[in-house]
C-alpha cells in the first residue's frame, strides 16, 4: 500500500468468515451458519458492491465520488474513496444520526452535506451534484456493478461452508444485496436453494411489490430499521421474485428485529442494526417453521444467514429500542 493510503490493486472489501453459530443452532434446531459481513471495515456488506462500482469507474477516469446515504452506503463510498485517494461528498438526509456524519468526516475524510428530509430528496440533490464530468454518482443499491460486487459474498460462503445450505436468509432494503446474492447463487450452483427475504413493517417496499406484482412506492419509512428504508425496491429485485418461485418475502415487526439484535449481541458479542436484525429474526423466531407449515420450504438442516452489519447503531440506541418495545 502506498503512503497516500490509496490501493490501486485488488478489491476494497475483505473476505469475511462464515461461522457456525452454536447458540443460534441450538435454539433453532438446525445448523445456522453466519456470513459475518458486519466485520467489513466500513461496517457492512455495502463495500463489496460500492467498492466494485468505484474500482470500475476509476479505471474510466473518475476523479470524485458523490453518494446520498444516511448510513452504510455513504460510509462504504467514503471509505472506498479514502482508500483510492479520491475526494468524496456524502449527502445525508436530516434523519441521519450525528455520529454517522462525524464518522464520515473524521474517520474517512469525506465532505458531508445535509439535504432533505428523506433519502429520496438527498438523492435528487446528489444526482444533480454528480452531473459535472469525472464525478461518479454512487447509488446505494441500484446498479449492476454493485450487484456483481455483492455476489462475492456468496462465492466466499460457498468455499467456507461444509455443504450447500437448505436456505439462505437475507435482509432486503433496496434490493441490491438480494440481487447480488442471486448472481452469486447462480455462479456457485445454488440456483435451486430457496432464499428468505426479510423486511420490517414500515420498510417493506419489496413485499409490497411482490404482493402487487409491480413496483410500489411507500409513502414514508415508519420502521426503526431506517437502513431498510428504500421507498421503492429495485426493479431487478421484483423481476427476480417473479422469475424464481424460491424467493420468499417475509415481513416482521420492529420489535422482533430489535429483539434479534439484542440476542445476537449476547450470543456473539456483535452490535448490528435492526436492518440486519431482520434476517437474524428469521432464525431466532418462527419464520422458517412458518414457511415450512405453508409448504414453501422443505426440510432445513443448514441455514446461511447473511449478517449484513450496519454502522447506524450504538449500545445506547439499542437500549432505547429495547425499552421502547418493552423487550
Image (tube, helix red, strand yellow):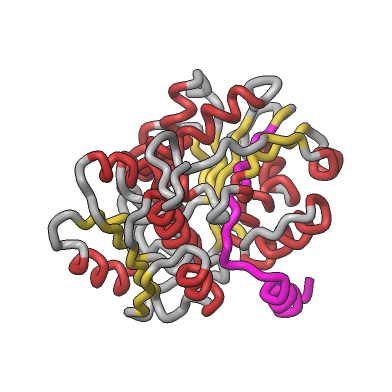
Residue at 55% x, 40% y is 14
Q: Is residue 43 visible?
A: yes
Q: Is residue 208 visible?
A: no
Taking 99 as reference, is 176 left or right? left
Tell me if residue 158 comes above or below residue 195 in the rendering: above
Residue 271 vs residue 132, the one in the foreground: 132
Residue 9 vs residue 91, the one in the foreground: 9
Residue 151 location, quadrant:
top left
Tell me if residue 61 comes above or below residue 195 in the rendering: below
Residue at 67% x, 70% y is 314
Residue 23 location, quadrant:
top right
Q: x%, y% of residue 65?
A: 30, 58
Q: Is residue 76 magenta?
A: no
Taking 117 as reference, is 194 left or right? right
Q: How many numbered discs, if any? A: 0
Q: Is residue 313 magenta?
A: yes
Q: Which residues are magenta?
A: 303-327
Q: x%, y% of residue 103?
A: 52, 69
Tell me if residue 321 comes above or below residue 275 in the rendering: below
Taking 149 as reference, is 294 left or right? right
Name the quadrant of the C terminus: bottom right
Q: x%, y% of residue 94?
A: 42, 81
Q: x%, y% of residue 30?
A: 78, 33
Residue at 33% x, 79% y is 116
Residue at 73% x, 35% y is 19
Taking 259 as reference, is 218 left or right? left
Residue 63 location, quadrant:
bottom left
Residue 76 vs residue 121, the one in the foreground: 76
Residue 45 vs residue 276, the one in the foreground: 45
Amino acid at each position: 500500500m502506498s503512503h497516500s493510503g490509496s490501493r490501486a490493486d485488488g478489491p476494497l472489501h475483505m473476505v469475511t468468515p462464515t461461522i457456525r453459530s452454536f447458540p443460534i443452532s441450538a435454539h433453532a434446531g438446525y445448523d445456522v451458519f453466519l456470513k459475518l459481513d458486519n466485520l467489513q471495515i466500513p461496517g457492512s456488506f455495502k463495500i463489496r458492491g460500492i467498492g466494485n462500482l468505484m474500482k470500475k469507474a476509476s479505471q474510466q477516469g473518475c476523479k470524485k465520488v458523490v453518494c446520498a446515504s444516511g448510513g452504510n452506503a455513504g460510509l462504504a463510498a467514503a471509505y472506498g474513496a479514502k482508500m483510492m485517494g479520491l475526494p468524496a461528498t456524502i449527502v445525508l438526509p436530516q434523519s441521519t444520526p450525528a455520529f454517522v456524519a462525524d464518522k464520515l468526516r473524521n474517520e474517512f475524510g469525506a465532505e458531508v452535506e445535509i439535504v432533505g428530509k428523506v433519502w429520496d430528496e438527498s438523492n435528487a440533490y446528489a444526482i444533480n451534484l454528480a452531473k459535472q464530468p469525472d464525478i461518479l454518482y454512487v447509488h446505494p443499491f441500484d446498479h449492476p456493478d454493485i450487484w456483481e460486487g455483492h455476489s462475492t459474498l456468496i462465492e466466499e460462503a460457498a468455499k467456507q461452508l461444509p455443504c450447500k445450505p437448505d436456505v439462505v436468509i437475507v435482509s432486503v432494503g433496496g434490493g441490491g444485496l438480494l440481487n447480488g446474492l442471486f448472481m452469486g447463487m447462480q455462479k456457485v450452483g445454488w440456483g435451486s436453494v430457496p432464499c428468505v427475504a426479510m423486511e420490517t413493517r414500515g420498510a417493506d417496499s419489496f413485499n409490497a411489490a411482490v404482493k402487487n406484482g409491480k413496483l410500489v412506492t411507500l409513502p414514508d419509512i415508519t420502521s426503526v430499521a431506517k437502513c431498510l428504508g428504500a421507498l421503492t425496491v429495485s426493479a431487478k429485485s421484483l423481476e427476480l421474485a417473479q422469475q424464481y418461485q424460491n424467493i420468499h418475502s417475509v415481513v416482521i415487526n420492529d420489535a422482533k428485529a430489535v429483539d434479534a439484535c439484542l440476542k445476537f449481541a449476547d450470543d456473539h458479542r456483535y452490535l448490528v442494526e435492526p436492518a440486519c436484525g431482520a434476517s437474524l429474526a428469521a432464525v431466532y423466531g418462527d419464520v422458517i417453521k412458518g414457511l415450512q407449515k405453508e409448504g414453501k420450504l422443505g426440510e432445513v438442516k443448514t441455514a446461511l444467514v447473511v449478517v449484513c452489519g450496519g454502522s447506524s447503531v450504538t449500545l445506547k440506541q439499542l437500549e432505547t429500542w429495547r425499552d421502547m418495545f418493552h423487550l
